[in-house]
Image (cartoon, rainbow, N blue to C red):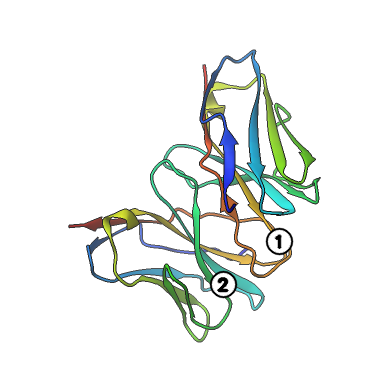
Amino acid sequence: DAKTTQPTSMDCAEGRAANLPCNHSTISGNEYVYWYRQIHSQGPQYIIHGLKNNETNEMASLIITEDRKSSTLILPHATLRDTAVYYCIVRVASYGKLTFGQGTILTVHP
Amino acid sequence: DTEVTQTPKHLVMGMTNKKSLKCEQHMGHRAMYWYKQKAKKPPELMFVYSYEKLSINESVPSRFSPECPNSSLLNLHLHALQPEDSALYLCASSQLPGLADNEQFFGPGTRLTVL
């Protein structure tokens, strides 16, 4: 699986959009970008994934650059409950393995 | 039911004890996983089961013994563990490893302490 690079930590004000970047410059054509988050002492939670096109669901939006070498997870209106570690993972869908990097610690403050 | 349950939530064991962790899902998923997470580190894959058969073993020491008795249940048998095995053990499930829309659903984990 391709390696990802994320900032160690980010801050966001409550109610504002949180934009979490991820660099995956060695991504292959058949590799998907997945985002998970882990709130303190809980199991990871799936957020969203995509291959080429931008994706949106009830939790977030995923913007993938045209060359697919980077992506951004957008939480449109961050709340205090969004404080968590956010993991960007690149993997081939045909394999079950999720390889977690160090992730970004997002802190949402009032 | 979109939940993965794990029992127990906490476990303290000595190095000579034998214990088991249990994981259950009723989403009809045919792939199940064990991950290990040390403090302040990301989760690391240990095992993958696909259709109740072990498909991936990430070179895990034999003191960890997985078992998948049926499609809903996954066990992790522990024997002669070391203090460095203390960690959060996470179970996950997904429809199948080979599907594109294949998010993994994680349980809350078992916090294991080895004395």
Say which amino acid is labelled 1: Tyr
The residue closer to the viewer here, B114 or B21, is: B21
The residue closer to the viewer here, A80 or B12, is: A80
Tag 1 subunit: A
- Circle 2 residues within 10 Å: few <14, some 14–19, many ≥20: some
Provide the secondary structure element on which disc 2 rests: loop
Q: Where residue A97 appears, x then y in whole percent?
A: 65, 55
Q: Residue at x 68, y 32 (%)?
A: B76
Q: Is residue A57 visible?
A: yes
Disc 1 designates what residue?
A: A95
Say which amino acid is labelled 2: Thr
Disc 2 designates what residue?
A: A26
Q: Where residue A68 appears, x then y in whole percent?
A: 53, 80
Question: In the picture shown, does residue B7 fall above or below B98?
Answer: above
Q: Residue at x 36, y 61 (%)?
A: A7
Q: Is residue B59 visible?
A: no
Q: Where residue A74 appears, x then y in whole percent?
A: 37, 72
Q: Residue at x 75, y 53 (%)?
A: B30
Structural distance between the alpha carbons of marks 1 and 2: 18 Å
Q: Nearer the viewer, mark 1 or mark 2?
A: 1
